[in-house]
Amino acid sequence: MSTVTVIGAGTMGAAIAWRVIAGGNEAQVLTRRPVATAIPGAKHGAVGDPITGEIVVLALPYSAYDEVLAQYEGQLDGKVLVDLSNPVDAETFDGLVVPAGSSAAAVLAEAVPGASVLKAFNTTFGATLTTGEVGDQKTAVLIAGDDADAKAALAAVVEAGGLRAVDAGSLKRAHELEALGFLQITLAATEKTSWTGGFGLTS
Amino acid sequence: MSTVTVIGAGTMGAAIAWRVIAGGNEAQVLTRRPVATAIPGAKHGAVGDPITGEIVVLALPYSAYDEVLAQYEGQLDGKVLVDLSNPVDAETFDGLVVPAGSSAAAVLAEAVPGASVLKAFNTTFGATLTTGEVGDQKTAVLIAGDDADAKAALAAVVEAGGLRAVDAGSLKRAHELEALGFLQITLAATEKTSWTGGFGLTS
């Protein structure tokens, strides 16, 4: 059994914790503020509590990363650290706040060199993690990273939870995943697709 | 009725010309070498022949753009010029040959400032232009560009041909479309999706 620590319990964090538990794995959910409704089966705690998971999912806005990471300095070494952010420039809504050609995941990997950073979940809307489908396709969680064991560990949790895990290549592909995530957000925001849909990957 | 000039008659060019004709519009198909099999209803010619379409689709590898554009210097002014390339670095297969943060479409727009450049068709595999579907979704042709009239003209041809046209925003979004196109190619090349599928956009 794996333990996954999910930091954040918004739409994404709650859906991921639920899928982790549905797959027979353990979810520790750490939040900055107490949650209104506990996630059944999850072990709730506060950001700052010791991390029990070998996989840690940052289910936070990108802008909150620094604040949360500061509380876990040195404690993420050896962990699989999952970045699901779409670092959209909230002022212009016309690009990302990360350097051109790079990605939030690459920035995170530099900030936490002791962790195995993966990009995942940023191309699926929260609703499709819950329903498990995009159109007639099973929701596909695209995972990019340089550590094959880390990718396999996350993929096992995703698949156990009933979703499709897809190896999207090296961490360099986080750039493309973030472009896709951003594009998908712009299309939903302009009603070209729905927040319960988006892009479905055919098998 | 619109006339669309399609330069190139490979998988993409032939599928686009066929959809143009299916929609009751006219297709001029110009190729560097004579085609083995004529596309029914298309007016075939050679690259270098005068362009009759108000919409011109470059259905060519990105590496062939310069050679073909050189033959039409000044003749593309006032045209809607459609870039469908995925400028993948063929040596590394690990990125694109265009500058980081930019796009082939942006490079093209600089090279042909008199034309209204659009990015379109690069996120749909040729097969899905022909079948008209990706999974259970109608094939969506994502169109990015800065000229609303140009986008509307192309969208009308796409919709008449039986596909879904989706306004993907300004030409800046070509960066995201090219990232998606590249990602989709890597996923098909590694058998995570099929060349007859890829990403389908839910409505």
Image (cartoon, coloured by chain):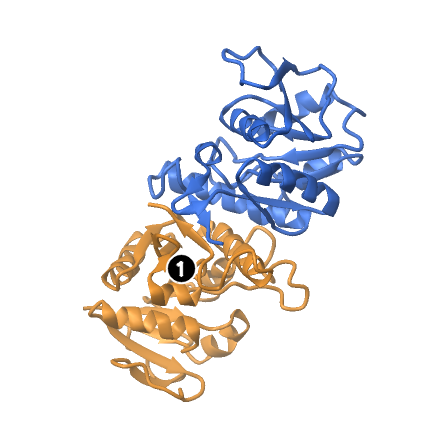
Chain colours: A blue, B orange
Question: Badge 1 local density, few (<14 within 10 Å), some, or many (20+)?
Answer: many
Residue of label 1: B120
Instruction: Answer above or below: position of B116 versus A92.
Output: below
Residue at figure coordinates x 66%, y 16% from the top left: A47
Percent across and percent down for residue B179 are 53, 53
Residue B162 lies left or right of residue A161; in this view the side is left
Q: Is residue A187 above or below residue B96?
A: above
Query: Residue B61 versus residue B49: which sits nearer the camera?
Result: B61
Q: Quadrant of residue B157?
A: bottom left
Snapshot quadrant of residue A33? top right
Residue B23, horizontal then vertical, whole percent: 22, 67
Callout count: 1
Q: Nearer the viewer, residue A152 or B7?
A: A152
Q: Which structural element holds mark 1?
A: loop
Q: Quadrant of the C terminus of chain B?
A: top left
Quarter of the image for residue B139 reads: bottom left
Q: Amino acid at mark 1?
A: Ala
Q: Which residue is at 41% across, 89% downward?
A: B34
Q: What chain is tagged by disc 1?
A: B
Q: From where the camera sits, is residue B114 visible?
A: no
Residue in the picture at 44% in, 63% down:
B196
